[in-house]
């Protein structure tokens, strides 16, 4: 329980930094005169370094059993991301993203594997606690960084690194050695467990990919869209993103509990089909009804965050670090790396409203793909 609590707090701060770019983009676009395509490229670089690279760290954490992958990550992420306000140009922003993204990527595989270590039953609930803590951090990140940039100025954003540094000190001091985790896993990557369950793993991967197309593209571009096309203030746009992600954190927590009762397959089906009308309401209406649709869309869309990870860990229990990275980072990252720049490019040509609204067709595809999962899952 102590390890779960520590890692959940660590996940909160790691994902606080992972959502910073979306909130800071309106400031950076104005300061550096960036195009929407460049903004999309920065978002793609963020998800590549913080998510696509996660399987590399998952492999390393399965091979080298040291807690430093998780313990040092909050400080590295905090320092890199919080320095964005100091960047004098596009290239420097890109460099800070690479550094911060490395910290984010190194934390997730090891921490998600350790969060359920030794848990014989109720793994969905334990994973829901861990993931919901991260999603809550992601939800508060836009408000935190927007408030800081408005209050202290963008050039003083480096003060935001303090929580990450303090969290690393706490993890180094209190996170126990990984002897138990090392004994329960093999010393390196083993392909055999994946060969036996490759079909459901591939389906799970693409389901995460489909969900992440909407989830991560919204997280990166929603403040810019609300500010430029719907007249929100920068602070108001960040608050709307925080509401969307907070609802997602609640959804992830509920989804983990529901999966222990209904099964993961049913929860994924419910999530994919129910989020579509709510997201449509957000785009097709205005005022509080629109924002309510955004919140409910986020809640139902993110039902599946802990579910996919737990199902994948159950399919390949000897490679939990690697498989967690595939489901939490790699699928998320590939989706973001492709669709954030693509959505930015489409926004330059067709407008952000049309570009973002077109993404809500993907959960419908996910619903029919989920029907291919074995019914016992």
Image: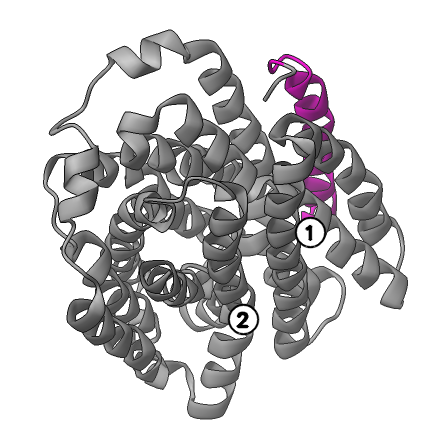
Question: Which residue is found at the position 33% from the left and 49% from the top?
Answer: 108
Assess whether mark 1 and mark 2 are in contact (beta carbons under 8 angstroms).
no
Which of the numbered marks, if any, corresponds to residue 298? 1
Dividing the picture into quadrants, the one containing residue 118 is top left
| One can see residue 7 in this view | yes
Question: Horizontal and vertical percent for residue 142?
Answer: 53, 69
Q: Mostly what secondary structure, the magenta segment?
A: helix
Label 1: few (<14), some (14–19) or many (≥20) C-alpha neighbours in 10 Å: many
Q: Is residue 23 magenta?
A: no
* Nearest the eye: 177 or 56: 177
* Residue 369 drawn above or below residue 90: above
Left or right, 361 with respect to 219, comes to: right
**Secondary structure at numbered mark 2:** helix
| Residue identified by numbered label 2 | 140
Question: Which residue is found at the position 49% from the left and 62% from the top?
Answer: 133
* Nearest the eye: 340 or 255: 255
Dividing the picture into quadrants, the one containing residue 188 is top left
Question: Which residue is found at the position 71% from the left and 33% from the top?
Answer: 272
Query: In the rendered view, how is the structure colored?
Result: one colour
Question: Horizontal and vertical percent for residue 358?
Answer: 72, 36
Question: Horizontal and vertical percent for residue 69?
Answer: 19, 52
* Nearest the eye: 267 or 2: 2
Which of the numbered marks, if any, corresponds to residue 269? none
In the rendered image, the quadrant that contains the C terminus is top right
Please report the bounds of the magenta region as a residue range. 351-374
């Amino acid at each position: 329980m102590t390890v779960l609590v520590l890692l959940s707090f660590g996940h909160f701060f790691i994902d606080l930094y992972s959502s910073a770019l979306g909130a800071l983009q309106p400031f950076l676009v104005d300061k550096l005169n960036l195009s929407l395509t460049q903004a999309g490229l920065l978002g793609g670089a963020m998800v590549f370094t913080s998510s696509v690279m996660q399987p590399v760290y998952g492999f390393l954490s399965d091979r080298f059993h040291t807690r430093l992958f998780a313990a040092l990550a909050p400080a590295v992420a905090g320092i890199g991301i919080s320095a964005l306000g100091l960047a004098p140009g596009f290239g420097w922003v890109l460099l800070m993203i690479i550094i911060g993204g490395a910290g984010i990527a190194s934390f997730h595989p090891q921490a998600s594997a350790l969060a359920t270590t030794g848990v014989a039953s109720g793994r969905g609930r334990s994973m829901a606690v861990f993931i919901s803590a991260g999603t809550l951090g992601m939800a508060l990140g836009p408000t935190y960084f927007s408030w800081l940039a408005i209050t202290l100025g963008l050039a003083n954003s480096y003060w935001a690194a303090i929580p990450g540094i303090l969290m690393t000190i706490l993890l180094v001091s209190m996170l126990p050695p990984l002897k138990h985790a090392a004994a329960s896993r093999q010393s390196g990557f083993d392909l055999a467990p994946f060969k036996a369950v490759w079909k459901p793993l591939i389906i799970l991967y693409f389901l995460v990919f489909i969900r992440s197309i909407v989830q991560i593209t919204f997280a990166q571009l929603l403040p810019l869209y609300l500010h430029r096309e719907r007249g929100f203030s920068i602070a108001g746009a960040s608050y709307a993103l925080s509401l969307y992600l907070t609802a997602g954190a609640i959804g992830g927590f509920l989804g983990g509990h529901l999966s222990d009762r209904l099964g993961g397959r049913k929860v994924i089906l419910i999530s994919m089909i129910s989020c579509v009308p709510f997201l449509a309401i957000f785009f097709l209406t205005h005022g509080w009804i629109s924002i309510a649709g955004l919140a409910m869309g986020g809640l139902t869309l993110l039902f599946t965050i802990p579910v996919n990870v737990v199902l994948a860990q159950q399919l390949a229990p000897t490679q939990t670090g690697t498989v967690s990275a595939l489901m939490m980072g790699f699928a998320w990252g590939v989706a973001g790396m492709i669709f954030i720049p693509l959505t930015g490019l489409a926004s330059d040509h067709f407008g952000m409203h049309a570009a973002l609204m077109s993404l809500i067709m993907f959960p419908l595809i996910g619903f029919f793909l989920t029907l291919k999962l074995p019914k016992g899952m």
